[in-house]
């Protein structure tokens, strides 16, 4: 099984930030509510997850299937070719991300990734230990054939669980590298 993160890993951007920009440009009716949420987030009045929880229902009400498809096409233009090469032809791939399901499902389908695990509206954010638990609950087994590809220390629980397999880290920050080394996690940088 190959488990791949989305933001900063399979794509070279933060997909949710790009999604908010897309929603702002595409839907004038969303602009004022978006500004309110973004300002509250920037001032740290609300958490990142709370901002997502306010933005996703707005997007679901205002964006058509065609709009989401257009956003997915944008994400496809931002795919990291090195990561795409690793997952192409891999036996069993799962996209595991904190990004919201509203566009992750369409993106996974577009890039022929059969399984995905994303943040569901009204649910806990799919990151850290929660991401690992969701993967385990979906039947994923970590063994010597498992590959995990990520860019961030948020996925430490996932990387620790993959102690027998191969861990690839994409463009890691210095803080992420320090965290990985402190935890004794084996990894290769791509």
Image: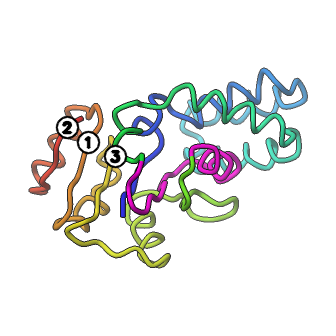
Distance from the alpha carbon under mark 3 to that under mark 1: 5 Å
Contact flag, marks 1 and 2 (Cβ < 8 Å): yes
Contact flag, marks 3 and 1 (Cβ < 8 Å): yes
Can you tell which mark lies on residue 150?
3
Where is residue 147 drawn, in percent x and y? 29, 57
- Apparent side of residue 107 relative to residue 184 in the rendered image (left or right): right
Q: Residues within 10 Å of mark 1 (few under 14, many from 20)?
A: many
Image quarter (top left, top right, bottom left or bottom right) of the N terminus: bottom left
- The residue sitting at 36% across, 58% down in the picture is 2
Residue at the far front in the pictured view: 89
Q: Secondary structure at mark 1?
A: strand
Can you tell which mark lies on residue 105?
none
- The residue sitting at 77% across, 25% down in the picture is 24
Along the line of sight, the residue nearer the viewer: 70 or 50: 70
Residue at the far top in the pictured view: 25
Along the line of sight, the residue nearer the viewer: 188 or 113: 113
Where is residue 107 drawn, in percent x and y? 62, 44
Q: Quadrant of residue 85?
A: top left
- The residue sitting at 10% across, 51% down in the picture is 182
**Which label's residue is closer to the chain start, 3 or 2?**
3
Distance from the alpha carbon under mark 3 to that under mark 2: 10 Å
Contact flag, marks 3 and 2 (Cβ < 8 Å): no
Q: Quadrant of residue 29?
A: top right
**Which label's residue is closer to the chain start, 3 or 1?**
3
Can you tell which mark lies on residue 169?
1
């Amino acid at each position: 099984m190959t488990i791949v993160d989305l933001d900063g890993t399979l794509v070279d951007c933060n997909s949710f930030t790009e999604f908010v920009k897309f929603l702002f440009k595409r839907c004038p009716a969303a602009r004022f509510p978006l500004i309110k949420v973004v300002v509250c987030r920037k001032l740290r009045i609300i958490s990142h997850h709370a901002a997502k929880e306010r933005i996703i229902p707005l997007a679901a009400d205002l964006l058509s299937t065609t709009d989401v498809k257009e956003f997915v096409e944008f994400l496809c233009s931002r795919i990291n070719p090195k990561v795409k090469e690793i997952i192409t032809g891999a036996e069993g791939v799962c996209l595991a991300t904190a990004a919201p399901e509203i566009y992750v499902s369409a993106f996974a389908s577009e890039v022929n990734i059969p399984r995905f695990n994303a943040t569901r509206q009204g649910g806990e954010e799919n990151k850290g230990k929660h991401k690992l638990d969701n993967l385990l609950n979906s039947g994923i087994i970590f063994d010597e054939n498992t590959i995990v590809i990520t860019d961030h220390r948020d996925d430490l629980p996932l990387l620790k669980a993959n102690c027998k397999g191969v861990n690839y880290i994409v463009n890691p920050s210095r803080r992420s590298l320090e965290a990985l080394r402190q935890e004794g996690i084996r990894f290769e940088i791509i």
